[in-house]
Amino acid sequence: MNVADLRQEPVPLPPGVQTLSFDDQDYPPLLRLIHDPPPLLYVRGDPALLSFPQIAIVGSRKASPAGLRAAGAIAGQLVAAGFAICSGMALGIDAAGHRGALDAGGKSTAVIATGIDRDYPRRHRGLASELERGGCVVSEFAPGTPPLRYNFPRRNRVISGLSLGVVVIEAAFPSGSLITAGTALEQGREVFALPWSMLHPGGRGCLQLLRDGAKLVRDVDDILEELGPLHALQRDMFTPVHSPMTAGNGSGAGALLDMVGFESSSLDELVSASRLPVAQVMAQLSALELEGLVRRCPGGYIRC
């Protein structure tokens, strides 16, 4: 069934809440590319932030003091580089990432697993209000939805789907953070992890991710180097394909368009041909799709 054909019954919206349907032009372009995007998003705050280049910061609810400091510091450095921070507003690492972004004067997105009118956990009502003013809070669940256990893993695919990459600060093994990392890999996003000691209680999940191929983070430069300069990301996601910035430019979406033929081209083929990071290619494909220049088909993308 086509996602665009799915519909949720209309419900009264709480004050200050906006909606974005899959059909809306302003629906987040990266989220549109995942295989099961939410048909409807409820948003408090600025919905335009959902289309801005974001990096997710996730980790343990029972984080160590060192983990909390690392989350806040990395978030602050990433917003200084021009990214927004995406997380789930949970206790521990999530909250530290949000706080680090806001304290640095940046923007942050909280993806929650309850109705948009419910702040969970309750002790984060103040944080939710700050995020509403300095970013946004978003949910795919109808207003009034309580915190149901099975909705949290489902929420995690939206965190990674909105983001160019996921940074796991601390994580037990197994844990919800590893679910987010796994979802990110399925979506073609980059996954990063901090290299804790094997004796660190919250380090086992990160060590497992690194063994499985996640990018090691010694400092924020490791993240920025992998995802590319901010100006390139902004250009690829927000500049029209035929603008002077992309026309004739070998690194822009216009160049990627030349690589998409009238027979199906897979994402792997386009990444190999363009020599660009997967997330950057996906962002460019989303822009081209919105322009009506390419469309998805079985096995990849085809030129319109």
Image (tube, helix red, strand yellow):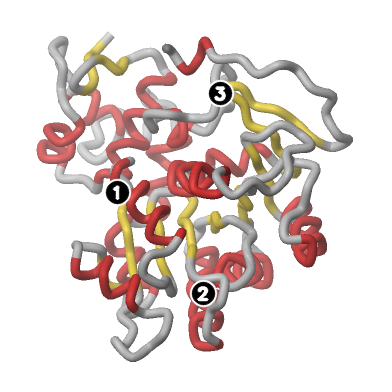
Label located before the other in sequence (1 or 3): 3
Where residue 223 sits, quadrant-wise, is: bottom left
Number of the label disc, if any, that sits on residue 75: none
Label 1's element? Answer: helix
Dot 2 and dot 1 residues touching (CB under 8 Å): no
Picture coordinates of residue 164, whole percent (x, y): 39, 49
The residue nearer to you, when weighing 30 against 236, is: 30
Number of the label disc, if any, that sits on residue 71: 2
Position of the N terminus, as image quadrant, is top left
Q: Amino acid at mark 2?
A: Ala
Q: Is residue 225 left or right of residue 20?
A: left
Question: What residue is pinned by disc 1?
Answer: 185
Name the front one of labels 2 and 3.
3
Q: Amino acid at mark 3?
A: Pro
Question: Which residue appears at 46% of the width and 56% of the height?
Answer: 55
Position of the C terminus, as image quadrant, is top left
